[in-house]
Image (cartoon, rainbow, N blue to C red):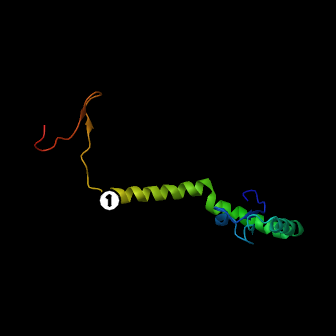
Amino acid sequence: MASHTPVVATRVTGIPEIVEQGVTGLVVEPGSPVALAEALAMLLADPPLCRRLGNAGRRRVEERFALRVNAGRLHERLAAAVEAGAASEAPRERPTVTSRTHLSRPSSAGSQ
């Protein structure tokens, strides 16, 4: 799809997320060689359909699955999660390093 190639796929796992019947490709039922052959024959007989599906497939890949787009979405979600977590947590005392070999922990009241 990323190379403007029309696809014929089966409706399994995450395929329907990217291949939409008649829009970004053709979808056939799994285990149906007759349906697969018919879909391939339809593409071979209709070059304008091939171009339309191929171009739509490329757009779908660019919009939903491009690395830059997904990295940006992931960054936004992680930043929101960090902000939400920081807002809901009470401040905690953290150990401080006073030298390379000594770690100082906050003392508890009344304990030694």
- Residue 102, position as x, y percentages in the image: 25, 29
**Image point 26% across, 40% down: which residue?**
95
Quarter occupied by the C terminus: top left
Residue projecting furthest to the top: 101
Closer-to-camera residue (110/72):
110
Closer-to-camera residue (78/37):
37
Please say if 105 is above or below 16. above
In the picture of the structure, the residue carrying the numbered disc 1 is 87
Q: In the drawing, does residue 63 fall left or right of residue 2? A: left
- Residue 106, position as x, y percentages in the image: 20, 41
The number of callouts visible is: 1
- Residue 58, position as x, y percentages in the image: 72, 61
**Image point 74% across, 63% down: which residue?**
9
Q: In the drawing, does residue 54 fall left or right of residue 100? A: right
Where is residue 12, by image quadrant?
bottom right
Identify which amino acid the numbered label 1 is placed on: Ala
Q: In the drawing, does residue 71 fall left or right of residue 93? A: right
**Image point 25% across, 49% down: which residue?**
92
Please say if 96 is above or below 13. above
Q: In the drawing, does residue 21 fall left or right of residue 35? A: left
As helix, strand or loop, the secondary structure at mark 1 comes to: helix
Where is residue 28, by image quadrant?
bottom right
Residue projecting furthest to the right: 45
Quarter occupied by the N terminus: bottom right
Residue projecting furthest to the bottom: 22
**Image point 37% across, 60% down: which residue?**
84
Please say if 74 is above or below 47. above
